[in-house]
Image: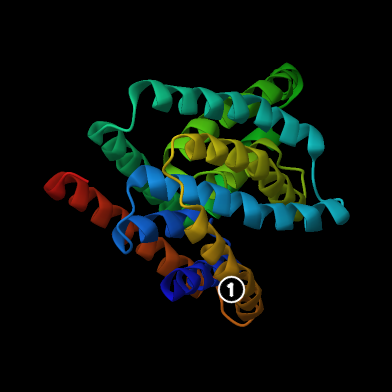
Amino acid sequence: MLAFVVAGLFVGAAVGLTGVGGGSLMTPILILLFGFSPSGAVGTDLLYAAGTKAFGTLLHGRQQTVDWPVVGLMAAGSVPAALLTIVWLHLVGLQPWVQELMVVTLAITMIVTALLTFARDRLVRWLQTRMLFVSGRSRSELLAWRPVITVCGGVVLGVLVSLSSVGAGVLGTTMLLILYPNTRAVRIVGTDITHAVPLTLIAGLGHLTLGTTDLGVLGLLLLGSLPGIYLGTRMGWRLPDRALRPIIATVLILVALSMIYKTMHFGG
């Protein structure tokens, strides 16, 4: 029991310290260290994420740093995609190849998250510059298509999060930074966190109906994560961002490769 509380404390501290989504760390910890099945780890982490992000949504809502129309656009794509993914999992069942698909999806999403941790600022600046300097009819067409692109991005996030529990954080924030370059960073973060709550809750409840989510472990993880987030946030003010990003990105890549290796050599 204590080990799960410590795991929640560690992940909470890492989230507060670096801003990287908890799913990137919690799901592989449950799989590699505690022997959870991929579906069990994903389902448990989704409800864990819904609980922790709900608190963040409350804070951002009070500070009026949530763009609710954009949340609606993202959810219009992600929620139906999550529901369809859960229905598909019910239809095909949690067969070994489905479990392996979850691990591979998780590993690939973690690697993309790690690469974005390294290069996101540069990528976002380059794409924002191209969007800001588009003029005339082309810019009008671009703005007209932006809601559609936002919904489509939500669809991708809905599938990824339902299969791996990862993607709503770094990938969602990156998409919003690119599509909405004139929006304040704190509003981007608040919007992304708020969107993640219904997505992770619905996907998590869907996994709960599959019978693999461990509610007892979920409670222990939350017990450790809340003080962990507080401690990590306090420590984050004292540690340079340039030092933290390479560390967390390297850890994500190593863990992702470990999961792929385990899947290939031991059948998940």
Figure quadrant of the N terminus: bottom left
What colour scheme has been applied to the protein in the rendered image?
A: rainbow
Dot 1 falls on a residue whose secondary structure is helix
28 relative position to 245: left or right: left
Q: Is residue 129 above or below residue 22?
A: above
Q: Is residue 208 visible?
A: yes
Residue 16 is situated, as x and y percent measured from the top left of the image, at: 60, 68
Q: Is residue 262 above or below residue 75?
A: below
Look at mark 1 in the image and give the residue it sits on: 228
Res. 135 image quadrant = top right
Query: Which is more toward the observer, 183 or 234?
Result: 234
Mark 1: few, some, or many residues within 10 Å (few <14, many ≥20)?
many
Q: Residue at x 67, y 49 (%)?
A: 193
Residue 209 is situated, as x and y percent measured from the top left of the image, at: 50, 35
Q: Is residue 175 above or below residue 49?
A: above
Residue 84 is situated, as x and y percent measured from the top left of the image, at: 51, 22
Residue 126 is situated, as x and y percent measured from the top left of the image, at: 57, 44
As drawn, the residue found furthest toward the bottom would be: 238
As drawn, the residue found furthest toward the left would be: 265
104 relative position to 205: left or right: left
Q: Residue at x 56, y 49 (%)?
A: 47
Q: How many marks?
A: 1
Query: Which is more toward the observer, 161 or 222?
Result: 222
Q: Is residue 175 visible?
A: no
Type of residue at label 1?
A: Gly
Res. 248 image quadrant = bottom left
Q: Residue at x 27, y 39 (%)?
A: 100
